[in-house]
Image (cartoon, rainbow, N blue to C red):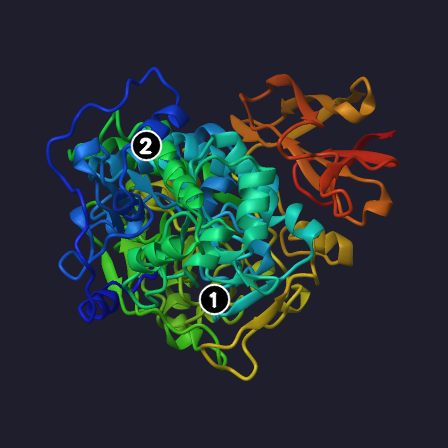
Amino acid sequence: MRLCLALAVCALLALSGCGSREGGSGSTPPPPPPSTNPDQRADAILAQMTQAEKLQMVHGGLTLENSVGPHNAAGWVPGISRLGVPELLYADLVTINPSTALPSALASAASWDLSEAHKYGQVIGSEMRAFGMNVCLTGDMNLTSREPRDGRTFETRGEDPLLAGMVEAAHLEGIEEQHLIAGIKHVAMNDQETARFTANAVVDERAARESDLLAFEIALKTSGAQMVMCAYNAVNGTPSCANSHLLTQTVKGDWGFPGFVLSDWYATPSSVPAALAGLDQEQPGGYMFNGVWTPESLQAALQNGDLPATRLDDMVHRILRAMFASGLFDQPATVQPIDAAGDAAIAQEMEEQGAVLLKNTGQLPLNSSALPSIAVIGSHADVGVLSGGGSAQTFPVGGAALTLPPACPPYTPPPGGAACTGASQIYDPSSPLTAIRAHAPNATVAWNDGSDPAAAAALAASSTVAVVLVSEWESEGMDRVDLSFSNNQDALVSAVAAANPHTVVVLENGGPLLMPWLSNVSAVVEAWYPGQKGGEAVANLLFGTVNPSGKLPMTFPGAVADLPRPVIPVPSPPDSTSAFAVDYTIDGLNVGYKWFESQGRVPLFPFGFGLSYTTFSISNTQLTTGTPASSGFQVSFDLQNTGAVAGAEVPQVYLALPSAAGEAKRLVGWSKVRLDPGAKQHVTINVDAGGVSHPLSIWDTTTNAWVVPGGHYTVYLGNSSAAPDLKMAGSFDL
C-alpha cells in the first residue's frame, strides 16, 4: 500500500505542485437510471466525457494545496460535477482517525470463520463510510510463509490460498455492503519489505498460479471486488504495475476481472508502457516523486498514437463501472458518527474467536476462586495491547494508551535491507491487567513491567500463577531480521518459568516467533495484535469465559534454518536502485505447511493447529466421490464434543494429488462447528472440482489452463495439517 511516512511525504509534496483539475464538488445531476447494469451506466457517462475529463479519472489528484486529500483521504480523484460523477476518496486504516482498532487481519483468518470475517469487513466498511470515504484500500493477499519475517505479516490472511482467499472474500463482501469500492493488493508476490521497490520475485508460472495468485483469484471471484492494486516489486523481471502478463492476461483475461487496476502509492514505473500493460489508474498523483504518469504525458501519447484512445476509454470505463457496481452514485457516503460501542464489541468477539491456544498442561482456564495471587508481567499490560504499524495502523477510539518510538534497534537491517519507517508503536487502550483484576476480584493481582527479569521472577515466585505477556512489533517498510522476541523477552519468560511452574504466556505479535522456553511454561495463548478490546478478550480466554477455538493460519517454524530462505534476500551490492532477485522457485508451489511436508521438517506448530478447553472426537468417516469422480467428492463424519464445556472445532480436509504432480497435501475444505458438552453432529464437507479454488487441479503451463491429473488421490481429515492430528479418510483413482 502507500508509504506510511506521512510527515515526510507532506514535506516532499510541498516541493512540487500540479495543475488544476476539471470538475469538482457542487450540485450534481441525477445519474443514469439504476435499472441499467454497471457497464451500460458506465458507457452512458463515458460517451459524454471530454478527453481532459477522462485523463482526470486515471490520475491521482493530490496537489500542493491539498497534499493529503479531502477529509484526510490517502488518495483522491476529483469528481466531475457536470456529469454527476462523484469524487473518489481513498482510505487505508491509517488515514481514519480515530476508528475501531480491530484485531489484525491474521487474527481474523485464525478464526477460520467466514461469518466472523464478514463482520470484520462490515466494521471497516461502515467506519470508512462514516468518515466520508468511498474507496477502501484493504486486502493483502500475499501468502505469509513466503517470508514469515515480513513486516506486513499481520496484515495478511495466512499461508494457504484457499483459507486466505475465502477469508478475504468475506472481508470484501462486508465492506462492499456499505457501498464502497473494495480492493485487494498487492499483485503479486509482494512478500518482503526489504528493498521492496527493487526486489524482483522470480517464480515459475505454475507455482505462482497455485499459490499467491490463486489466493487473489479466489478472493476476487468469490467477492466480486472491483479494484486490484499492483505492487512495488517486479515479477520475473517486469515491474508489477507494468506487467501485462499479470494485469492483462491473468487478472483481466483469465480471471475475467471487470474492475480497475490502480498502482500502489508511487509504484507507477512508466506511463504508456504501464497503461498498455493494464494499469488503469495511478496514485497518488503523477506529479509526485517519479512524475511519469501525468495528464500531459498521457495526452501526448494519445496525440502521437502511442496510447490508443480505446485503451483510455477502457481505463475510464472500468473505473466508472466499479463506481456504479459499488453504489457510489446511488448511495453516496455521508459523514456521521461511528458506532464505537457496537464496533468495539465486534472487535472483542473477533479476537476471542481468532486467538489460538498453543499449549495447555491443564493450567487454563484459570479458576479465580482458587487463585490467591496472580502475577501479571510485561508488554505494558497495565495500559494496553500492541498493534501493528504502517498503513494498516489504526489510531484507536479513546486514543493510544501508549505511544513509543519505532523499534528500530532490534530491527537494524542488513546492508541494503529495509530501513526503519519512523512509525510509532501504538498500544490500544485495553489493559489486560485491569481485565484480569476484574475476573479475580478476591485475588492479589500484582504487576511488574518485565524490564528486569530477576525482579519479575521474584514476583512470580511469590504468586500462585504468573501471566507473562510478550510482544513483538511489526510495521510496513521493514522486516524482522529473525524470528526471536526482542528486548530480552525470551530471558524474561525463562526466568519467570524457572521461578514458577504455573506460568502462562500470552503472545502479542504479527506472525510466527520462536519459543525457546516452550517446554518450561504451562500454557501459551497466541493473541496476535488483539485490538480495541484486546485486554478484555485475553482475560475472557484465560479465565474460560470464552473457550479458545482459533487455528493457526500459518506454520510456526522451529528454526530460521527451516525456512526456504534462512536469510532475507538483499541487493548485492546493496543500493537503492539496482534490481535484485528473490528466488521463490526454492519453495515454488509448496508454500508454508507444504514446504515443511515436502522437506520432511517438523514445525514448532503446524498450520491449522489450535487447542481447546474441551475435547472432540471424529468417527464414522465416509468418503464419497462424485459421478464422475473427477467432479469432486465429499467427506462425511460424526463430530462429538467429548469434554465438559461447550466449544468449537475446525475439521479440515486435505488432498494429496498423484505423486507426479510434485505437490504436498493441500487444504480443500473445512467447517467450524460449535457443540455443547456431549453433543454430536453429522458433518459433511463438499469439495467441488469445478470450484473457484480448483481443488483437484494443477496449472498446466503447456495449455495455460487448469487440468485434473490422472492417478491416485488420497483424502485426509483432521484438525491440523500434520500428523498425528491428520488421518487418512479414503482414496480414489482418476
Mark 2 falls on what kind of element?
A: loop
**Quadrant position of the N terminus in the picture:** bottom left
Image location (x, y in percent) of residue 295: 30, 55
Identify the residue at image location x=54%, y=55%: 243
Q: Quadrant of residue 148?
A: bottom right
490 vs 602: above or below: below
Which three-letter amino acid code belongs to the residue tagged 2?
Ala
Q: Quadrant of residue 478?
A: bottom left
Image location (x, y in percent) of residue 303: 36, 54
Which three-letter amino acid code belongs to the residue tagged 1?
Arg
- In the displayed structure, does residue 78 sit left or right of residue 147? left
Q: In the image, which is nearer the foreground, mark 1 or mark 2? A: 2
- Answer with mark 1 or mark 2, whichever residue precedes in sequence: 2
The reply to whether residue 142 is in sight is yes
Q: Mark 2: few, some, or many residues within 10 Å (few <14, many ≥20)? A: few
Mark 1, residue position = 196
- In the displayed structure, does residue 195 sit left or right of residue 28? right
Mark 1 falls on what kind of element?
A: loop
Identify the residue at image location x=46%, y=77%: 577
Of the pair 52 and 592, the residue shown nearer to us: 52
The reply to whether residue 544 is in sight is no
Q: Which mark is residue 47?
A: 2
729 vs 563: above or below: above
**Quadrant position of the C terminus in the picture:** top right
Q: Which mark is residue 479?
A: none
Identify the residue at image location x=63%, y=26%: 642
Q: In the image as oriented, which residue stretches furthest toward the front?
A: 304
